[in-house]
Amino acid sequence: MDAVHVQGLGQGTFCLGLGDSEAFIRVRAMAQQAVGERVFSPTDLVAAALGSCLFAVMEVLLERWGYNPSDFRLTVKKEMADVPRRIGALTVTVIPPFPLEALEKKKLERAMALCPVKKSLGQDVRVTILWEEPHGDSGIESAKGPGL
C-alpha cells in the first residue's frame, strides 16, 4: 500500500499525493476557504472516502446481477457537529437509474455495511443510507439482471 504524502502550501492549503504517482489532491481547511472557493476540505475527503468505498462494494453485486455500475450514482451529504467540532452525520443517497426491488436494496445495504471506511467511523458519526427513486425515463432498460 502506497503512503499518502501531505505537503503544506501555506495559508491552510496543502497537497495530498499518493506514493510515487503524479496523482494529487489540493485541500484547504474549511476555516481558510474564501467565499465561493470550491476546494476539498479534510472532512469532505472523509465523505468522499465513504462514498467511494460504498460504491466499490455495491459495484461487485451490480456487475454480478448484470447491471452497469456506471449507470448508478450516489451522493454523500456531510453534517458537522459543533462540540467538539467533528463530522456528526453522513447521509448517503443511492440514485439508481431504474427502480430496484426491495430484495436488491437489502442485499446492497448488507454489502455496504462491509465497507471498511464505514466500519472505521466512530459510533458518534451517524451514517444513513437513503434510496432515491428514479425520475422519468432514464433511457436505461430496467430489465432484471441475472443472479437474483
Image (cartoon, rainbow, N blue to C red):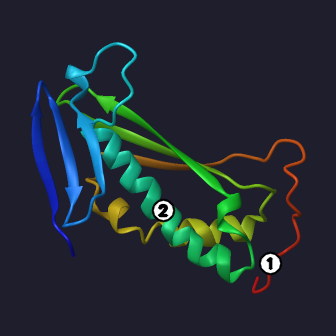
Residue placed under numbered mark 1 in the picture: 145
Q: Residue furthest bottom?
A: 147
| Res 28 → quadrant | top left
At label 2, counting other C-alpha atoms closer than 10 Å, the crowd grade (few under 14, some 14-19, many 20 or more) is: many
The quarter of the image holding the C terminus is bottom right
Quick one: label 1 or label 2, which is nearer the N terminus? 2
| Residue in the picture at 19% in, 66% down | 19
Q: Secondary structure at mark 1?
A: loop
Image position of 137 (left or right of 116): right
Residue placed under numbered mark 2 in the picture: 54
Which of 100 and 145 lies nearest the eye of the viewer?
A: 145
Which of 74 and 29 lies nearest the eye of the viewer?
A: 29
At label 1, counting other C-alpha atoms closer than 10 Å, the crowd grade (few under 14, some 14-19, many 20 or more) is: few
| Residue in the picture at 11% in, 45% down | 7
Image position of 109 (left or right of 120): right
Q: Contact, CB < 8 Å: mark 1 with mark 2?
A: no
Which of 52 and 27 lies nearest the eye of the viewer?
A: 27
Is 63 drawn above or below residue 122 in the view shown?
A: below
Q: CA–CA distance between discs 1 and 2?
A: 20 Å
Amino acid at circle 2 = Leu
Which of 139 and 65 lies nearest the eye of the viewer?
A: 139
Amino acid at circle 1 = Gly
| Residue in the picture at 67% in, 64% down | 105
The quarter of the image holding the N terminus is bottom left
| Res 80 → quadrant | top left
Percent from the top left, x then y, of residue 43? 29, 40
Percent from the top left, x then y, of residue 123? 28, 52
Q: Residue furthest top?
A: 35
| Residue in the picture at 21% in, 55% down | 17
